[in-house]
Amino acid sequence: MKKDTVIKQNRDYRRVYTKGKCEVSSSLVTYVLKNRLRKTRIGITTGKKIGNAVHRNRARRVIRAALRDLYPILKKGYDIIFTARAKTTFVKMQVVKKDMRRHFELMGILNEKNCN
């Protein structure tokens, strides 16, 4: 991901949390809201309930690795926030990727022409 595709402002996080759609699974929570930009921005949050810094960093790495494969087939113009759950640290990237893809399909932000 490029630096300009990352959500950094707290107001952007709050806007997506309050106005966006939410999907929940055992390893991941996904929030999505359409933005007025022509690019998709990504945010990843890991709370202290996840564990110490090592566990929180692993959770972020697993989420980023799962997103790397799905990012090219996402529709443009959305703000997406992923929130790690306690299980995220202990599962493989493929499990998170499967949950992530299911969330995207339910929210309708996958390009159908590029989906397998």
Image (cartoon, rainbow, N blue to C red):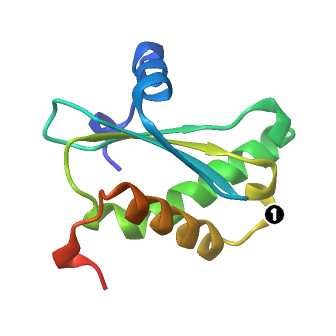
| Residue at image location 38% in from the left, 36% down from the top | 6
Q: Is residue 67 above or below residue 84?
A: below
Horizontal relation, residue 48 to residue 39: left or right: right
Which residue corresponds to mark 1?
A: 90
Query: Would you identify the image quadrant in which residue 75 lies?
Result: bottom left
Give the amino acid type for the residue marked by disc 1 in the picture: Phe
Depth order, front residue of 40/58: 40
Q: Count residues near mark 1 (Cα–Cα under 10 Å), then give few for <14, some for 14-19, many for 20+.
A: few
Image position, residue 21 (x, y; %): 44, 40
- Which residue is rendered at x = 24% and y = 32% of the image? 35
* Percent of width and height locating residue 103: 48, 59
Q: Residue furthest top?
A: 11
48 over 30 or under it: above or below: above
Q: Could you tell me how many numbered marks the image carries?
A: 1
| The C terminus: image quadrant | bottom left
Tell me if residue 115 comes above or below residue 69 in the rendering: below
Q: Using the rendered view, name the quadrant where residue 39 is placed.
A: top left
Residue at image position (51%, 56%) is: 64
Determine whether, in the image, residue 114 is placed left or right of residue 19: left
Which residue sits furthest left? 38
Q: Name the residue: 51% across, 62% down.
A: 100
- Percent coordinates x, y for residue 33 in the rendering: 34, 36
x, y percent for residue 52: 86, 38
Q: Taking 46 as reference, is 26 above or below it?
A: below
Judged left or right of residue 12, residue 111 is left
Q: Residue furthest bottom?
A: 116
Find numbered disc 1 in the image and state the secondary structure of the residue it sits on. helix
